[in-house]
Each structure stands twice: as C-alpha cells, then as structure tokens.
Image (spheres, rainbow, N blue to C red):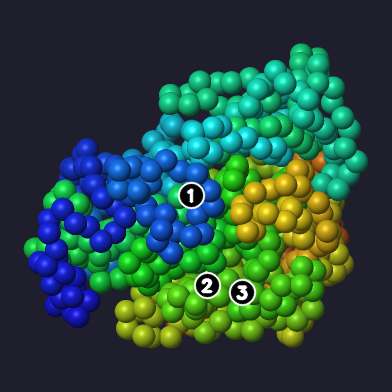
Amino acid sequence: MNTKRLRVAVLALLLAPWVALGAVTRLEITDRVPFANGMSFGDVGPYEKVKGRLHYEVDPANSANAQVFDLQFAPLNDNGKVEFAGDFILLKPADLPRGNHRLLYDVNNRGNLVALGYYNSAPGSNDPSTAGDAGNGFLMRQGYSLLWSGWNWDVVPGGGRMQIDLPVATDGGKTISGLINTETVTATLTGPDRCQPVAWGNSWGYEPLDPRDRSEAVLTVRDEPLGPRTYISGNLWEFSFQPVQAGIVTNLCLNDGVGIESGRIYELIYRAKDPRITGLGLAAVRDAVSFFHFEPQDSFGTPNPLAVDGTPDPEFAYMFGSSQSGRLIIHMLWQGFHVDEEGRMVAEGLIPHIAGGGKGGFNWRFAQTTHHPSHLEGRYFPVDFFPATYEPLYDPLSGGFAGILDRARELGKVPLIVQTDHELEYWTRGASLLTTDPLGTSDAPYAENARFYLLNGTQHGTPPSRTRDIYLYSGNVVDQRPIGRALLVVLDNWVSRGIEPPQSRYPRIDQGQLVTPAQNKAMLPAIPDLTVNPGDSEQAWWVDYGPRFFTEGIQTNVPPTIRGEYQNLVPIPDVDGNSLGGLRMPEVQVPLGTNLAWNPRNPAIGNPGFLARWDGSFFMFPLTEDERIATGDPRLSIAERYKDQDDYVFAIAGACERLERDGLLLDEDAQHIVSQAQAMEWPPVPTETFPFWQLRR
C-alpha cells in the first residue's frame, strides 16, 4: 500500500463513523447494477454502475469557499452550513483491485456526459448502461473509475441530463433582483420564430421580477456585434413561461407578424429575480471529486463505493472537461476551487479540452452559464476576460498583471495540466490568447506544469457527416479523438511516474506561425469552390461590467461597456490551405483536401459574413491533373500526390508512425487508421458523405 492510501486508512480508523472530512455529507445510492450486463473489459473485467444523489454541506467560514459570490445570502442549516444536493453516476471496476486506481471525473456539459463519447468513441448517452454505451471500451480497458455529477443549476431536466439544486440568494428572506442582459440568435431555415428561450442550451433562464412591468425592460435588435441597436416597442413582445418538471423555462416572444428573424442579435434587458448561488456548482465539482478520491465513507457510515476495506481506491484523480466544461476547469483553477475545505488538491491532473481562451459565467450573481462569445453571438458575456495565460502577464488594457495559476501557487497546490484545442478555437474562441500577450505581439512564457497542443485543421467537435446543414460548405470531419486517448496516457504517466510529456505544440509568433485572419485569407490558395471567406474571427473584448463585478460578482453596467479589444490570431496555412504550427492527424498530414477550421453561415440563415459557432469545412482536392487544370485549382490533384491507394496507405502509415513515436498516438489507433485507409473506396468519391468518414463511423 502506498503512503497516501495508508494515511487515509489510518485516518478512517481514528474518525468516528459519523464524521466525514469532505463536504459531501451523505451518499444516497438509488441504483447499483452491473454495467453492460456484466460485459468484461480486457484484464480489468466487468464494470458496475452506481447512481444516486450527493448531499453537500459547505462551510461559509472556510477559506476554500471565500470565492463563492453571494454565499452570505444562502440559507443555513442548524450547523451553520449551506446545504444542497445533486445527481451522480459512477462507473467502476466491479473488482477495484483489477482497475488502474485512477478516478477520471468528466465535467458534464450542460448536463450531458462527454468522456465516453470522446475517449471511447461511443454514441452519446446520459445514462450509460449497455455495451453500446461503452463504445470501444478504451477507458474501461485502461481500468478507470468514471465519475459524473451535477454542477450547473440551470440545466433543464430531460434526456437524462445531470441535475443539481443550488440555493437561491435572498437578503434576509427578501427577494433579490437585478437588471440582466441576454442575447438570442437563431439559425433556422424555416423563417422567423415567435418564441425563443432567453438562455439557449437547455437552460431555464431567469424569471423576470414582474413580467408585466416594462419600465426597465428594453428589447433591441442589431445585425452585428457592434452594430446599431433598433428598439422594439414593448407592445410587440412579451415573456412566456414553459413549465418543465420542477421549474419554468423563460422565453422571449415576439407578436405574430413580427417574429425573431434568423441571424439577427436580439438583446433583452430586464429585471430578474431569485439569483442562484452559481459558484456553489464549482464547490460541488470540487467536493464530489474530493469525496470519491479521499473519503472512506459519508457522515452516516455509508461506504465510498471506491473504497476497499475502508481505504479509498484512487491513487490519483484527473478532471476532464470539454468546451464549456473545459472552461469550468480553468475557471476553478483560476479561483482556487481545485483545493477542498481540508486544503487537499482534489485532482492531480487536469485536461481542459476545446476551452479556447476562456473561463465562464460560472460564479457571478445572475450568472448565465450557457452563454459564451463566438464570432456573431454573445460577444460581451464574461468568458474571455483577462488573464488567459497560465503564467502572469501584463494587460495594457486593464492595467492588470496576472495568470491563471496565481491562486494555485498561493495555495501551494499546482496540478499538472494537458490542454488541447482544435483549430476552430483560434477562430471563434480566442485560443491564441492562451499562448500570447493580450495584444498578440509576442509569445507568452511556458508554464512548466502545463502542456498545450493545437490540433490543426479541426473544428470544435466531430460531426456525423459532411452535410452542409445550415452552413455554406461541406463539413470538416477530421476525427481528433485518437490524439485525446494518447494524451490521457501521457497525463497519467506524467502524474504517476514523472515521465515528461511531449513538448507543447502550438503556433508561435516568433516562428511566424500566427497571423491575423485577414493575413490568413490572403495566404489561402484560390480554391474554386471557396467563394466566401470573411477573413475575420472572434476577437475577445475588454469588457467593463462595472466596479463591483470582479470583487462582489455583481454586474452594474447592463449591458456592459466595451472598452477595447484583445488581438486574437490564427495559424498560417500551407500551400494546400491546411494550417501549420500544431499537431496534425494522419488525414491532415496526408490530405485528400483542405481541412478548414471555419465555415461561414449559409445566407438562408442570415449574416453569411460571420462564422459558424462550432463548424469547420472541407474542400476535396481535384481527382486528376486534367480536372485541376480545367477548374483552375492551384492545389495538386490526388492522382499527382499518390500513385495509387497503396501509396496513400503507405503515407498514412508513416504519419501514424511519427505520431506514435512521439507518444501522441496509441498503437491500436494507428492500426485502426491504417486499416480504414486500406478499406476506403479509391479514388475517393467527391460527395458530401465522404467514404473515409463513413468507414470511420
């Protein structure tokens, strides 16, 4: 038994059975069954699913909770603590000693489970139960215990989404209200909508204090983020409320004959009521991981399902979060929520994935957790605020000097970090600000405890096909997940064995690999079908929310004031238009076309000069030299690049070998990628359902 586990075991013997060190006081198990009908996963064997509720108590006097805004307005129990409860799901080896003694916590995204889809290439499920839900079984074959828990109060129930009940802030029992701003942008091909939620992403949205009182309510519409606002009269719109299980979804409705037009930005300012204490969601993540990592039992003697003979099994805990959830991890680190009430660092390794340069609306009064900036929508919501780099830098706009790791270093608890971003995050999520100064003039210093990897030619997620949907060009379907699997192994080796990861790989200013979007546009080859290129990207704003925002979590400038702009840069393209400066999947190293990380909006949904929020695009090379000449395409044809399919497969195998040698691709994935290249139709068929993608699914 290692030292850490021995120490925990001794503490368990010394403590009374009703005492728990962590802030999870009661473990309520509602379901405990074999996972996937007892299916065995390699040497680890079968898995078990444990499901239920976690009951929390947070001490307002503990310094670990000092950053929870509005905690002083929470109701207290007889012990002077703040109580709340939320869902959890645990997948664990049925025989824990056969596992790898690692806990992987997946921060759910708007209530949805992500890790099985990302690491196991599984179809999405919020209640994984079957062999199909296990996908390729990668995490199970590795031996991980997998944990999910609710953290986001405004997730609407349904579809098995994780729930948590966070308390409402009141001032001595009196209702707290405040002005808030929301934005609604739709992207439909069916014409104007009458009603839309005030907060997208399956979110409740805050109820107005008085839906009939329009004295402070203002609705405007504009066509661009900095465009002029047009006032919409109060007799043309109204609130509507949609009951959903235990709550009400707040909607904005325009009268018949007006409607919410696709592609336009509708901004609604109104007085809302009953702010949830959203920062307790960060504390809930912290305390859920802490309990399963460190505690032998809850305060009532219920054993931790991850304990063996009174000793917690996990030797190490890792946190993974994708997109919004990755931003939550960075936000927690920035505010010190990775350290629990006992002063323990709850996770030794962190994986913020496709988080871009942001944090989030996760710990403010009237926080709207789903909103985030992109090229068109949500540009002023509190996400891309300074600092963005792990090491401290000076911000000439705000005058601040800070880094994400400042609080962690004050606490003496600095985890190891492997951060991955796809190229789209450079275009619509400010990712370059992670590695440059705020004005984009020089590279930021390295953080010794962090590695950052850009995956070139990739969009935000992995779509099911190349269909254009509501965007202008065929979709980008580069599958990024094999790199993610390899980097989980890299992080584990770094944390548990001290093996240094591969050096960070991202485009740098000092190597001429980062340029403005306009410069990138000028460098792209003149691809015949590429008729619309906005030559622009989301630029993070320096936003003034008022003097109380960062000290008390209260926004007094509603809407906020735009004071300036940070400079977000994008990678340079090569002669084919595929970007440079990061990691390339084999299909980008050995391309059959140009994989762009951006895709303009279809004119049918409005505002075609702006980029899709999450989608990239793909432009196949001409098949032959004659086709290239006839179309005027400057890119070499597929026939000029590869003599035949065997030649293409040989090149793919070489790309896999290089990644595998660098520790960035696992052998099983390398073999799979090569076998797919061998099985694909040749020559490739230039259709929207590209055969290489069909095989990969």
As drawn, 475 above or below 5 = above
- Please name the residue that numbered disc 1 is placed on: 71
Q: Earlier in the sequence, mark 1 or mark 3?
A: 1
Q: Residue at x 25, y 61 (%)?
A: 21
Q: Residue at x 10, y 66 (%)?
A: 13
- Please name the residue that numbered disc 3 is placed on: 403
Residue 196, percent from left and from top: 66, 27
Q: Residue at x 52, y 25 (%)?
A: 248
**In what element is the residue under mark 1?**
helix
Q: Amino acid at mark 3?
A: Gly
Residue 556, percent from left and from top: 72, 47
Residue 513, percent from left and from top: 73, 78
Horizontally, residue 172 falls left or right of residue 10, namely right
Residue 456 appears in the picture as rendered: yes
Q: Which mark is residue 517?
A: none
Labelled pair 2, 1 in contact (Cβ < 8 Å) = no
Res. 191 image quadrant: top right
Residue lying furthest front: 172
Residue 644, percent from left and from top: 58, 68
